[in-house]
Image: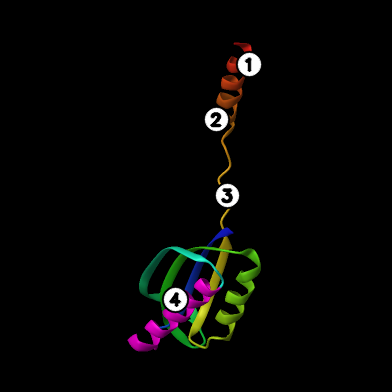
Amino acid sequence: MRIYELTIVVSSKVNEKEKTTFLEKIKNLIEKSKGKIDSFKEWGKRTLAYPIKKEKEGVYFFWEIKIDEAKIQDLDRALKLNEAVLRYLIIKKEEKKQSTKSKRQESVKRDKKSNK
């Protein structure tokens, strides 16, 4: 499984009940795909930089999820088909690479062990 960041902008005209239903659908879709939600944040209503579908404001949501790479397409399709979604962005996070300094330290430790 890979780690993804999912940011969604939903129409500000969506009421509280519809918003809750939408969030539950996304959560269920992730869980059905055997994914895991690491974090969720509602950034709230913000003014858009430019109008999208004649809307000037949107409600922002941010998820950090672990999901299989093949299942991310299902999530993408579901977001495309939802009329309340103004924009969304799915970003694959890079795995943390070991720094050069720590690699050198490990090789020095290995060399010292082999010399004993």
In this picture, residue 24 sits left or right of residue 77: left
Residue 112: where, in percent of width, then height?
58, 15
Q: Secondary structure at mark 3?
A: loop
* Real-space CA distance between mark 4 and mark 2, rounded to the nearest whole angstrom: 43 Å
Residue position marked by numbered label 3 in the rendering: 95
Q: Are marks 4 and 3 in contact (CB under 8 Å)?
A: no
Q: Are marks 1 and 2 in contact (CB under 8 Å)?
A: no
* 1 or 3: tag closer to the N-terminus: 3
Mark 4, Cα crowd under 10 Å, few <14 / some 14-19 / many 20+, is few
Residue position marked by numbered label 2 in the rendering: 102
Tell me what residue is drawn at x 55 percent, y 80 percent.
79
Q: Nearer the viewer, mark 1 or mark 4?
A: 1
Residue position marked by numbered label 4 in the rendering: 48
* Dot 4 amino acid type: Leu
* 4 or 2: tag closer to the N-terminus: 4
Residue position marked by numbered label 1 in the rendering: 114
* 3 or 2: tag closer to the N-terminus: 3
